[in-house]
Amino acid sequence: MSGIPGLVGEVLTTTLGPSVIRPGFCWGWCKTWRLGREGDPKMKWTASGVTVNDEVIKVFNDMKVRKSSTQEEIKKRKKAVLFCLSDDKRQIIVEEAKQILVGDIGDTVEDPYTSFVKLLPLNDCRYALYDATYETKESKKEDLVFIFWAPESAPLKSKMIYASSKDAIKKKFTGIKHEWQVNGLDDIKDRSTLGEKLGGNVVVSLEGKPL
């Protein structure tokens, strides 16, 4: 489908916000969709047909399993990692050189949360895993957080395909307790927002920084 005759210039209303349809726009990856006028949010999508690369699953399992390890093995553990679509938009893959290792902290990385936020592209979508270390009023904890980064400045086409492919990767991340959709830097740069996601007002610090 290379364009939608009669609907050019209409407003497409989705959970990602209203956008104007332009000539030649294509939703060829969506198997099921409906269009609605502004104020009539009938747009929906189902599975995009995108698959998840095995390396993505391996990274998740390595981050999820907290077993006794040597100091060297701990240093190689991923603290944060980004996932993106392959060039042909058919697979979700581990994004090259977009990760933070535990061993980087205190060496090349002073604050892992701030460094993670800087990894996110300003004008495109991504999926991410972040291994949060935080303290409540009772104890210190670690939890994996699955993040869907969909900034307002990203192209509509990118937001659509990432949104329609999210379930494919989410289903592979079994046991994830925390999911966070972020639509811009203002939503994520303040670590207290993640603290609220992790435990509300009982979280008193994140990555050693008080909230």
Image (cartoon, grey):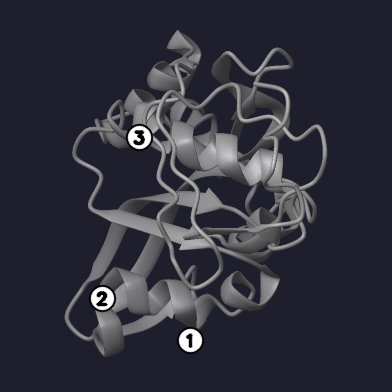
Q: Earlier in the sequence, mark 3 or mark 2?
A: 3
Three-letter amino acid code of the residue under disc 1: Pro
Compared across the picture, whether 45 is left or right of 171 comes to right
Q: Residue at x 30, y 56 (%)?
A: 178
Q: Secondary structure at mark 1?
A: strand
Quote the CA–CA distance across marks 2 and 1: 14 Å
On residue 199, which mark appears?
Answer: 2
Which x, y percent locates residue 190? 59, 80
The residue nearer to you, when weighing 205 against 83, is: 83
When asked about the image quadrant of residue 195, the answer is: bottom left
Categorize mark 1 by other alpha carbons within 10 Å: few (<14), some (14-19), many (20+): few
Marks 3 and 1, how far apart in space?
Answer: 33 Å
> In this view of the protein, which residue sits in the foreground, 108 or 10?
10
Label of residue 153 in the image: none
- Residue at numbered disc 1: 210
Q: Which mark is residue 167?
A: 3
Residue drawn at (70%, 51%), measured in percent from left and top?
Answer: 120
Observer-side mark, 3 or 2, equals 3
How packed mark 3 is, by other alpha carbons closer than 10 Å (few <14, some 14-19, many 20 or more), is some
Q: Nearer the viewer, mark 2 or mark 1?
A: 2
Please name the residue shown 34% across and 35% down the image.
Answer: 170
193 in relation to 176, above or below: below
Q: Residue at x 40, y 17 (%)?
A: 58
Q: Residues within 10 Å of mark 2 (few under 14, many from 20)?
A: some
Residue 81 appears in view = no
Mark 2 or 1 closer to N-term?
Answer: 2
**SS category of the residue bearing label 2:** helix
Q: Position of residue 29 (x, y in %)?
A: 56, 22
